[in-house]
Protein backbone atom coordinates (compact mmCIF):
# COMPACT_ATOMS: atom_id res chain seq x y z
CA UNK A 1 0.00 0.00 0.00
CA UNK A 2 2.99 2.30 0.50
CA UNK A 3 3.26 3.12 -3.23
CA UNK A 4 -0.42 2.81 -4.11
CA UNK A 5 -0.58 6.50 -5.07
CA UNK A 6 2.23 6.04 -7.59
CA UNK A 7 0.48 3.06 -9.19
CA UNK A 8 -2.82 4.97 -9.28
CA UNK A 9 -1.09 7.92 -10.93
CA UNK A 10 0.30 5.63 -13.63
CA UNK A 11 -3.17 4.27 -14.33
CA UNK A 12 -4.74 7.73 -14.39
CA UNK A 13 -2.25 9.37 -16.74
CA UNK A 14 -2.40 7.53 -20.04
CA UNK A 15 0.07 9.57 -22.05
CA UNK A 16 3.21 11.47 -22.90
CA UNK A 17 4.91 13.24 -25.81
CA UNK A 18 6.85 11.46 -28.51
CA UNK A 19 9.63 13.65 -27.22
CA UNK A 20 9.91 11.05 -24.52
CA UNK A 21 13.04 9.96 -26.29
CA UNK A 22 16.45 10.79 -24.91
CA UNK A 23 16.91 14.33 -26.22
CA UNK A 24 13.39 15.73 -25.75
CA UNK A 25 13.42 16.41 -29.47
CA UNK A 26 10.25 18.48 -29.48
CA UNK A 27 8.93 21.35 -27.38
CA UNK A 28 5.40 22.24 -26.29
CA UNK A 29 5.43 26.00 -26.81
CA UNK A 30 3.30 28.72 -28.30
CA UNK A 31 5.98 29.31 -30.94
CA UNK A 32 5.92 25.85 -32.51
CA UNK A 33 3.43 23.02 -33.00
CA UNK A 34 3.03 20.76 -30.00
CA UNK A 35 5.10 17.62 -30.32
CA UNK A 36 2.01 15.41 -30.28
CA UNK A 37 0.47 17.39 -33.14
CA UNK A 38 3.73 17.29 -35.07
CA UNK A 39 3.93 13.50 -34.93
CA UNK A 40 0.26 12.97 -35.79
CA UNK A 41 0.09 15.39 -38.74
CA UNK A 42 3.38 15.11 -40.59
CA UNK A 43 6.57 13.16 -40.83
CA UNK A 44 9.62 14.67 -39.21
CA UNK A 45 13.27 13.94 -38.53
CA UNK A 46 15.22 15.32 -35.58
CA UNK A 47 18.94 15.05 -34.92
CA UNK A 48 20.86 16.22 -31.88
CA UNK A 49 24.11 16.16 -29.96
CA UNK A 50 24.52 16.14 -26.20
CA UNK A 51 27.28 16.55 -23.61
CA UNK A 52 26.85 15.21 -20.07
CA UNK A 53 29.07 15.65 -17.02
CA UNK A 54 28.39 12.10 -15.74
CA UNK A 55 26.28 9.04 -16.55
CA UNK A 56 23.34 8.49 -14.23
CA UNK A 57 21.09 5.44 -14.44
CA UNK A 58 17.75 5.61 -12.61
CA UNK A 59 19.21 7.67 -9.79
CA UNK A 60 22.49 5.76 -9.49
CA UNK A 61 26.03 6.55 -10.64
CA UNK A 62 29.20 4.49 -10.67
CA UNK A 63 32.12 5.15 -8.31
CA UNK A 64 33.96 6.86 -11.20
CA UNK A 65 32.63 9.86 -13.14
CA UNK A 66 31.98 9.19 -16.83
CA UNK A 67 31.56 12.45 -18.81
CA UNK A 68 30.24 11.65 -22.27
CA UNK A 69 28.95 12.93 -25.60
CA UNK A 70 26.15 11.45 -27.68
CA UNK A 71 24.54 11.86 -31.07
CA UNK A 72 20.82 11.13 -31.39
CA UNK A 73 18.21 10.92 -34.14
CA UNK A 74 14.47 10.26 -34.27
CA UNK A 75 12.15 9.69 -37.23
CA UNK A 76 8.42 10.23 -36.72
CA UNK A 77 5.82 8.70 -39.05
CA UNK A 78 2.38 10.21 -39.70
CA UNK A 79 0.80 7.11 -38.20
CA UNK A 80 2.30 7.81 -34.76
CA UNK A 81 5.14 5.28 -34.95
CA UNK A 82 8.67 6.52 -34.36
CA UNK A 83 12.16 5.01 -34.50
CA UNK A 84 15.30 6.39 -32.91
CA UNK A 85 18.96 5.73 -32.40
CA UNK A 86 21.82 7.05 -30.31
CA UNK A 87 25.60 6.67 -30.25
CA UNK A 88 27.51 7.40 -27.02
CA UNK A 89 31.20 8.12 -26.51
CA UNK A 90 32.60 8.19 -22.95
CA UNK A 91 35.56 10.54 -22.68
CA UNK A 92 38.94 9.00 -21.86
CA UNK A 93 38.31 5.59 -23.42
CA UNK A 94 39.66 4.13 -26.67
CA UNK A 95 36.48 3.20 -28.61
CA UNK A 96 35.08 5.97 -30.78
CA UNK A 97 31.63 4.62 -29.91
CA UNK A 98 31.13 2.95 -26.53
CA UNK A 99 27.40 2.34 -26.76
CA UNK A 100 24.67 2.28 -29.40
CA UNK A 101 20.99 2.51 -28.48
CA UNK A 102 18.25 1.55 -30.94
CA UNK A 103 14.53 1.75 -30.34
CA UNK A 104 11.01 2.12 -31.68
CA UNK A 105 7.68 3.15 -30.26
CA UNK A 106 4.18 4.42 -30.82
CA UNK A 107 2.46 7.66 -29.84
CA UNK A 108 -1.00 7.62 -28.28
CA UNK A 109 -3.08 10.79 -28.21
CA UNK A 110 -6.37 10.65 -26.34
CA UNK A 111 -6.97 14.38 -25.99
CA UNK A 112 -5.13 17.68 -26.24
CA UNK A 113 -4.01 17.36 -22.62
CA UNK A 114 -3.59 13.59 -22.35
CA UNK A 115 -1.03 11.71 -24.44
CA UNK A 116 1.25 8.70 -24.17
CA UNK A 117 4.04 6.63 -25.71
CA UNK A 118 5.05 3.00 -25.57
CA UNK A 119 8.58 2.11 -26.69
CA UNK A 120 11.33 -0.49 -26.63
CA UNK A 121 15.07 0.33 -26.49
CA UNK A 122 18.03 -1.99 -26.95
CA UNK A 123 21.38 -0.97 -25.38
CA UNK A 124 24.40 -2.33 -27.27
CA UNK A 125 27.82 -1.98 -25.62
CA UNK A 126 31.08 -2.36 -27.54
CA UNK A 127 33.71 -4.83 -26.37
CA UNK A 128 36.03 -2.22 -24.84
CA UNK A 129 33.32 0.05 -23.45
CA UNK A 130 33.86 1.39 -19.90
CA UNK A 131 31.91 -0.39 -17.14
CA UNK A 132 29.19 2.22 -16.66
CA UNK A 133 26.49 1.50 -14.10
CA UNK A 134 23.78 0.81 -16.70
CA UNK A 135 25.77 -1.97 -18.39
CA UNK A 136 24.01 -4.64 -16.29
CA UNK A 137 20.81 -4.09 -18.33
CA UNK A 138 20.53 -4.25 -22.11
CA UNK A 139 16.79 -3.84 -22.77
CA UNK A 140 14.15 -1.31 -21.71
CA UNK A 141 10.38 -1.42 -22.18
CA UNK A 142 9.01 2.06 -21.49
CA UNK A 143 5.46 3.34 -21.03
CA UNK A 144 5.49 7.06 -20.37
CA UNK A 145 2.47 9.16 -19.46
CA UNK A 146 1.83 12.91 -19.30
CA UNK A 147 -1.00 15.26 -18.45
CA UNK A 148 -0.96 18.97 -19.22
CA UNK A 149 -2.57 20.92 -16.38
CA UNK A 150 -1.98 24.19 -18.33
CA UNK A 151 -0.08 25.69 -15.40
CA UNK A 152 2.35 22.71 -15.39
CA UNK A 153 2.86 19.29 -16.96
CA UNK A 154 3.07 16.09 -14.91
CA UNK A 155 4.35 12.76 -16.17
CA UNK A 156 4.51 9.21 -14.92
CA UNK A 157 6.80 6.63 -16.51
CA UNK A 158 6.98 2.87 -16.05
CA UNK A 159 10.20 1.10 -17.11
CA UNK A 160 10.98 -2.60 -17.19
CA UNK A 161 14.73 -3.22 -17.58
CA UNK A 162 15.99 -6.70 -18.37
CA UNK A 163 19.27 -8.31 -19.35
CA UNK A 164 21.88 -9.46 -16.82
CA UNK A 165 19.63 -7.84 -14.20
CA UNK A 166 15.85 -7.32 -14.16
CA UNK A 167 14.34 -4.19 -12.59
CA UNK A 168 11.14 -2.15 -12.48
CA UNK A 169 10.93 1.63 -12.08
CA UNK A 170 8.28 4.31 -11.76
CA UNK A 171 9.37 7.91 -12.35
CA UNK A 172 7.04 10.76 -11.36
CA UNK A 173 7.84 14.31 -12.44
CA UNK A 174 6.29 17.76 -12.76
CA UNK A 175 7.69 20.71 -14.70
CA UNK A 176 6.61 24.28 -15.38
CA UNK A 177 7.23 25.74 -18.85
CA UNK A 178 8.08 29.44 -18.89
CA UNK A 179 9.03 31.35 -22.03
CA UNK A 180 9.95 34.96 -22.68
CA UNK A 181 7.58 37.35 -24.41
CA UNK A 182 10.56 39.15 -25.94
CA UNK A 183 13.11 38.13 -28.56
CA UNK A 184 16.90 38.27 -28.56
CA UNK A 185 18.09 38.65 -32.17
CA UNK A 186 14.83 38.79 -34.15
CA UNK A 187 11.13 38.01 -33.77
CA UNK A 188 11.67 34.27 -34.39
CA UNK A 189 13.68 33.40 -31.29
CA UNK A 190 12.96 33.25 -27.57
CA UNK A 191 14.23 31.79 -24.30
CA UNK A 192 12.45 29.14 -22.25
CA UNK A 193 12.94 27.79 -18.73
CA UNK A 194 11.50 24.48 -17.55
CA UNK A 195 12.15 24.01 -13.81
CA UNK A 196 11.04 20.61 -12.60
CA UNK A 197 11.09 18.06 -9.81
CA UNK A 198 11.07 14.27 -10.03
CA UNK A 199 11.36 11.12 -7.99
CA UNK A 200 12.21 7.53 -8.90
CA UNK A 201 10.79 4.45 -7.19
CA UNK A 202 11.97 0.97 -8.11
CA UNK A 203 14.21 -2.02 -7.59
CA UNK A 204 17.99 -1.97 -7.96
CA UNK A 205 19.10 -5.47 -8.88
CA UNK A 206 21.34 -3.82 -11.50
CA UNK A 207 23.49 -2.47 -8.65
CA UNK A 208 24.17 -5.95 -7.30
CA UNK A 209 24.86 -7.31 -10.78
CA UNK A 210 27.19 -4.41 -11.59
CA UNK A 211 29.12 -5.02 -8.36
CA UNK A 212 29.45 -8.73 -9.14
CA UNK A 213 30.69 -8.11 -12.69
CA UNK A 214 33.01 -5.19 -11.84
CA UNK A 215 34.26 -5.54 -8.23
CA UNK A 216 37.46 -3.68 -9.14
CA UNK A 217 35.40 -0.52 -9.75
CA UNK A 218 33.78 -0.38 -6.34
CA UNK A 219 34.69 2.23 -3.78
CA UNK A 220 38.01 1.73 -2.01
CA UNK A 221 40.99 3.84 -0.92
CA UNK A 222 44.59 2.85 -1.67
CA UNK A 223 45.88 5.31 0.91
CA UNK A 224 44.14 3.63 3.86
CA UNK A 225 45.41 0.30 5.14
CA UNK A 226 42.67 -2.29 5.08
CA UNK A 227 40.76 -0.42 2.36
CA UNK A 228 43.25 -1.08 -0.43
CA UNK A 229 41.13 -3.85 -1.94
CA UNK A 230 37.52 -3.65 -3.13
CA UNK A 231 35.12 -4.40 -0.26
CA UNK A 232 32.97 -7.50 -0.26
CA UNK A 233 29.59 -6.70 -1.74
CA UNK A 234 26.46 -7.75 0.15
CA UNK A 235 23.43 -8.18 -2.08
CA UNK A 236 21.06 -6.77 0.59
CA UNK A 237 17.47 -6.63 -0.66
CA UNK A 238 17.95 -5.02 -4.07
CA UNK A 239 14.74 -6.59 -5.35
CA UNK A 240 12.64 -4.53 -2.95
CA UNK A 241 10.51 -1.79 -4.52
CA UNK A 242 11.55 1.42 -2.76
CA UNK A 243 12.39 5.09 -3.21
CA UNK A 244 15.65 5.55 -5.13
CA UNK A 245 16.12 9.20 -5.99
CA UNK A 246 14.80 12.76 -5.78
CA UNK A 247 15.98 15.47 -8.17
CA UNK A 248 15.55 19.14 -9.05
CA UNK A 249 16.23 20.24 -12.63
CA UNK A 250 16.66 23.63 -14.29
CA UNK A 251 16.88 23.60 -18.13
CA UNK A 252 17.37 26.93 -19.92
CA UNK A 253 16.89 26.92 -23.71
CA UNK A 254 17.46 29.22 -26.66
CA UNK A 255 14.80 28.39 -29.27
CA UNK A 256 14.31 29.08 -32.96
CA UNK A 257 11.68 27.57 -35.32
CA UNK A 258 13.81 24.54 -36.24
CA UNK A 259 16.45 24.20 -33.55
CA UNK A 260 17.08 24.52 -29.82
CA UNK A 261 20.21 24.91 -27.72
CA UNK A 262 19.77 23.93 -24.08
CA UNK A 263 21.88 24.04 -20.92
CA UNK A 264 20.52 22.20 -17.90
CA UNK A 265 21.51 21.58 -14.31
CA UNK A 266 20.16 18.76 -12.16
CA UNK A 267 20.64 18.32 -8.42
CA UNK A 268 20.31 14.63 -7.60
CA UNK A 269 19.57 13.20 -4.14
CA UNK A 270 20.02 9.39 -4.04
CA UNK A 271 18.35 7.51 -1.19
CA UNK A 272 18.40 3.87 -0.04
CA UNK A 273 21.74 3.32 -1.77
CA UNK A 274 22.74 -0.34 -1.57
CA UNK A 275 26.14 -1.94 -1.72
CA UNK A 276 29.48 -0.21 -2.09
CA UNK A 277 28.61 2.47 -4.66
CA UNK A 278 28.67 5.27 -2.05
CA UNK A 279 26.40 7.53 -4.12
CA UNK A 280 26.08 11.05 -2.73
CA UNK A 281 24.29 14.24 -3.68
CA UNK A 282 25.57 15.38 -7.07
CA UNK A 283 25.03 18.17 -9.59
CA UNK A 284 24.81 17.06 -13.23
CA UNK A 285 25.32 19.42 -16.17
CA UNK A 286 24.16 18.85 -19.76
CA UNK A 287 24.48 20.79 -23.01
CA UNK A 288 22.14 19.81 -25.84
CA UNK A 289 21.59 20.98 -29.42
CA UNK A 290 18.95 19.53 -31.71
CA UNK A 291 17.54 20.38 -35.13
CA UNK A 292 14.08 19.49 -36.44
CA UNK A 293 13.45 18.71 -40.13
CA UNK A 294 9.96 18.42 -41.60
CA UNK A 295 9.08 16.26 -44.60
Image (cartoon, rainbow, N blue to C red):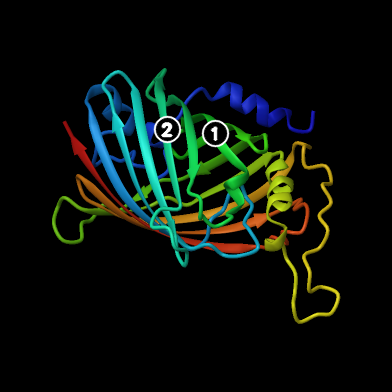
63, above or below 97, in the image: below
Question: As rendered, which of 113 and 61 lies closer to the eye?
Answer: 61
Horizontal and vertical percent for residue 65? 57, 65
| Residue, disc 1 | 140
Q: Are marks 1 and 2 in contact (CB under 8 Å)?
A: yes
Spot the residue most to the left.
Answer: 186
Spot the residue most to the front.
Answer: 127
Q: Secondary structure at mark 2?
A: strand
**Residue 156 in sight from this viewpoint:** no
Horizontal and vertical percent for residue 84? 36, 35
**Residue 224 in sight from this viewpoint:** yes
| Residue, disc 2 | 103
Quarter of the image for the N terminus: give it: top right
- Which quadrant of the structure image shows residue 42? top left
Horizontal and vertical percent for residue 184? 20, 61
Left/right placement of residue 17 relative to residue 128 reads: left
Left/right placement of residue 48 relative to residue 108 reads: left
Question: As rendered, which of 25 and 123 lies closer to the eye?
Answer: 123
22, above or below 8, in the image: below
26, above or below 52, in the image: above
- Which quadrant of the structure image shows residue 19? top left
Amino acid sequence: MKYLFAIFFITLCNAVNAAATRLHLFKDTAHAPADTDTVARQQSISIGVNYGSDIQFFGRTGPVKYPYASGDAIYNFKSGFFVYGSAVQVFGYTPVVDEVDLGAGYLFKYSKALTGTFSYTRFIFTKDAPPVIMSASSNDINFKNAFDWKFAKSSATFDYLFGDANDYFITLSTAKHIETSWSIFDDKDYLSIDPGVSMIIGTQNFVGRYSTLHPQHLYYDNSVRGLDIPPYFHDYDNGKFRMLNYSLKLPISYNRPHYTFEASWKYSIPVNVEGALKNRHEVFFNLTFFYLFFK
